[in-house]
Image (spheres, grey):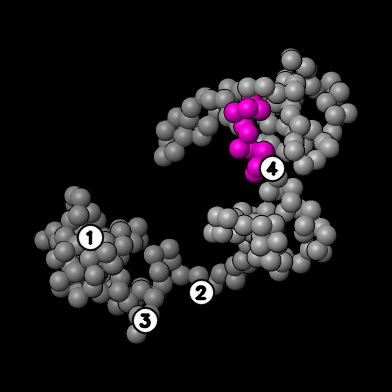
Amino acid sequence: MRQPPGTLQMQVLQTLSQTACKTPATLADETALERKQVVKIAAALVMRGLADRRERGCYVRNNVGEAFLLSGQKITSGPIGSRENEPPRRRVKRTVRQSAWHAIRIEKKFTLSDIMADVACQGDGLKQLQGNIGRFVNRLADMRRLPEIVDSPEAVYLDRQGDPALLYVYQPKATGRKGKVVVRVDFQTHGRHGQAGTITNSVRTSGTVEPGDLKNPRYVRLK
């Protein structure tokens, strides 16, 4: 039977000691829970500020946790807090291409009809859906040629608008428009956990472009 939200956290919080440091294995024995459950619950209690991790794999109930128990309060939700008074969250709808990519990763080998059947519930008309997915699949196929495109493009342009970028222009196999691969030059990545990012040349976008658009003054032909 599924436990109400917060019940397992309360069980572990009550089992913790303020003085003796307890490991997940000890807590699992004392609560009859699985060790993996205890590890997650202990981490949630630390996030709530009700417990402390003295060292790796060793937890105690802190003064806040002790006062919480003495007050008779109960944990009534999961580790990120109660959503009782929050408005209901809207489910983020996948785009057609996101759904197609998800289906491709599952199917591995597929036909265009297979992918269309998987994402047909998106609400697009049949012709529009076929065109959208077809273009997406063709772009994926073109990206397998990325080393060839960068090594021997039809033309290379410098995009002077915004961050400097190089446009490698090529001829896709399934369209009359020109294909493009955009490489951001000296692109600054964002570091994680406060660490500094790195500067790199990065493939940021791909797609197609009308030849006439490349006559815009923002583009300078290099090759």
Q: Where is residue 110 in the image (x, y as percent from the top left)?
A: 62, 57
Q: Number of marks in the image?
A: 4
Q: Distance between the residues labelled 1 and 3?
A: 28 Å
Which residue is label 4 attached to?
A: 139
* Gap in angstroms between the C-alphas marked 3 and 4: 46 Å
Picture residue at 28% right of the left edge, 67% below the top: 37
Disc 3 marks which residue? 2
Tag 3 near tag 4, CB within 8 Å = no
Q: Which of 147 and 26 is in front in this view?
A: 147
**Residue occupied by mark 2:** 84
Residue that appears at 68% across and 48% down: 137
Q: Helix, strand, or loop for circle 1?
A: loop
Residue 98's spot in the image, x, y percent?
64, 55
Residue flagged by tag 2: what amino acid is it?
Glu
Give the residue type that dot 3 points to. Answer: Arg
**Viewer-side label of 4, 2:** 4
Q: From the viewer's perspective, is 156 left or right of 83?
A: right
Vertical position of residue 77 compared to residue 217: above or below: below
Local crowd size for mark 1, using a 10 Å CA cut-off: few (<14), some (14–19), many (≥20) = many
Q: Where is residue 107 in the image (x, y as percent from the top left)?
A: 56, 59
Q: Which of marks 3 and 2 is nearer the N terminus?
A: 3
Q: The magenta stretch spans which residues?
A: 140-150
Q: Is mark 2 on a helix, strand or loop?
A: loop
Whether residue 63 is visible to the viewer of this picture, yes or no, is no
